[in-house]
Amino acid sequence: MLAKILLACAFVAYVQAGYIGNVGHGEATSYANAEAASYHAAPIAVAAAPVAVAAHSVAVEKSVDYHAYPKYEFNYGVGDGHTGDHKSQKEERDGDVVKGSYSLVEPDGTIRTVHYTADDHNGFNAIVTRSGHAIHPQQIKTVIAEPAIEHGSYDGHGYGH
């Protein structure tokens, strides 16, 4: 397989080299002779340059992995006494293993906490817990006083007699 790749690269280098010219009248022309001829004719130098670049690219057959190893850790929290918004989260990752937790205050006053893990073997798993006591607001009964009604006769026009 390596021989086929090298053969293909040599062919590409040959095709990219172009025609050097009639230096030597049919004899084999070396790269040094082509440089000497390029002093007098600029197109020869331009045609000879890709040969060196193509020959250099043949030697490089190295595979490069551009994916960085995923590793991080973070945490944050919010505690706003004015709005009552309280929450936090923390997470860490090492390769394909993720571990973390987050918590928040529910509208009833309890705190929901979720601990989670994720990996290739077990998938995503979460454990949800609830702490504190739920506080439900008391319903306030409002008593509206009835307006005093004047007793009298009604003549149909809104006037009492």
Image (cartoon, grey):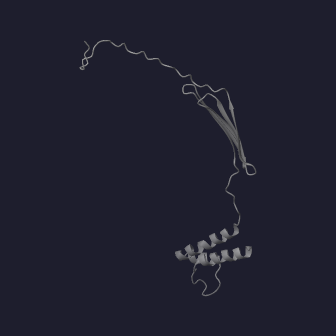
User: Where residue 127 sits: x, y (%)?
Assistant: 71, 39
Above or below 154: residue 51: below
Task: Please indicate whether residue 157 sits to the left or right of residue 127 in the image.
Answer: left
In this view of the protein, which residue sits in the foreground, 148 or 127? 148
In this view of the protein, which residue sits in the foreground, 88 or 18? 88
Q: How many numbered tags mark residues here?
A: 0
Q: Quadrant of the C terminus?
A: top left
Q: Residue at x 63, y 69 (%)?
A: 53
Farthest residue, direction bottom:
26
* Quarter-of-image position of residue 78: top right
Above or below 1: residue 111: above
User: Where residue 112 sits: x, y (%)?
Assistant: 65, 33
Q: Residue at x 61, y 31 (%)?
A: 106
- Residue 89 shows up from this direction: yes
Q: Residue at x 40, y 16 (%)?
A: 146
Q: Residue at x 54, y 25 (%)?
A: 82
In this view of the protein, which residue sits in the foreground, 41 or 152? 152
User: Where residue 111 sits: x, y (%)?
Assistant: 65, 30
- Residue 98 shows up from this direction: no
User: Where residue 64 sits: x, y (%)?
Assistant: 69, 60
Above or below 123: residue 43: below
* Quarter-of-image position of residue 44: bottom right
Farthest residue, direction right:
121
Task: Please indicate whether residue 36 sits to the left or right of residue 70 in the image.
Answer: left
Q: Quadrant of the N terminus?
A: bottom right
